């Protein structure tokens, strides 16, 4: 499936320096993708536990969302293959 102009990305990034988070943001920016960034602080146990409950083990955590708010895809880590399959 390919993204449409109304799709956007919600990206959960780790506070501080995270090379994979920065690389993911850079790639999305290069492709002109609208992003909503959510920085997760080390002491944000509520968000961290929620992400873990959904199987997330590393940052960044990416959600592709359509214009109606429907979740289309998710992944964690720097996944240029997933980014390109949706947005390139």
Image: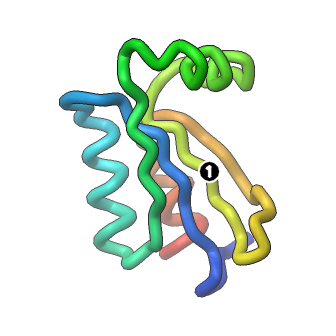
Secondary-structure class at tag 1? strand
Please report the residue visible at 33 percent of the width from the left and 61 percent of the height from the top: 27
Which quadrant of the structure image shows residue 48? Answer: top right
Q: Relative to residue 87, is residue 14 depicted above or below?
A: above
Image location of residue 75, percent across then percent down: 60, 41
Residue holding disc 1:
63
Image location of residue 19, percent across then percent down: 23, 35
Which quadrant of the structure image shows residue 72? Answer: bottom right
Q: Quadrant of the N terminus?
A: bottom right
Q: Relative to residue 88, is residue 44 depicted above or below?
A: above
Indicate the colouring scheme. Answer: rainbow
Of the pair 23 and 44, the residue shown nearer to us:
44
Image location of residue 42, percent across then percent down: 37, 16
Q: Relative to residue 74, is residue 64 depicted above or below?
A: below
User: How busy is the neighbourhood of tag 1: few (under 14 within 10 Å), some, or many (20 plus)?
Assistant: some
Q: Relative to residue 69, is residue 81 depicted above or below?
A: above
Q: Please identify the residue farthest to the left as the structure is shown.
A: 17
Please report the residue visible at 48 percent of the width from the left and 23 percent of the height from the top: 58
Image location of residue 66, percent across then percent down: 71, 71
Of the pair 65 and 44, the residue shown nearer to us:
44
């Amino acid at each position: 499936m390919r993204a449409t102009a109304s799709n956007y990305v919600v990206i959960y990034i780790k506070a501080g320096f995270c090379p994979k988070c920065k690389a993911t943001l850079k790639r999305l920016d290069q492709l002109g993708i609208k992003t909503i960034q959510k920085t997760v602080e080390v002491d944000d146990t509520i968000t961290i536990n929620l992400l873990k409950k959904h199987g997330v083990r590393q940052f960044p955590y990416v959600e592709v969302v359509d214009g109606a708010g429907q979740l289309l895809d998710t992944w964690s880590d720097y996944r240029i293959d997933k980014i390109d399959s949706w947005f390139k």
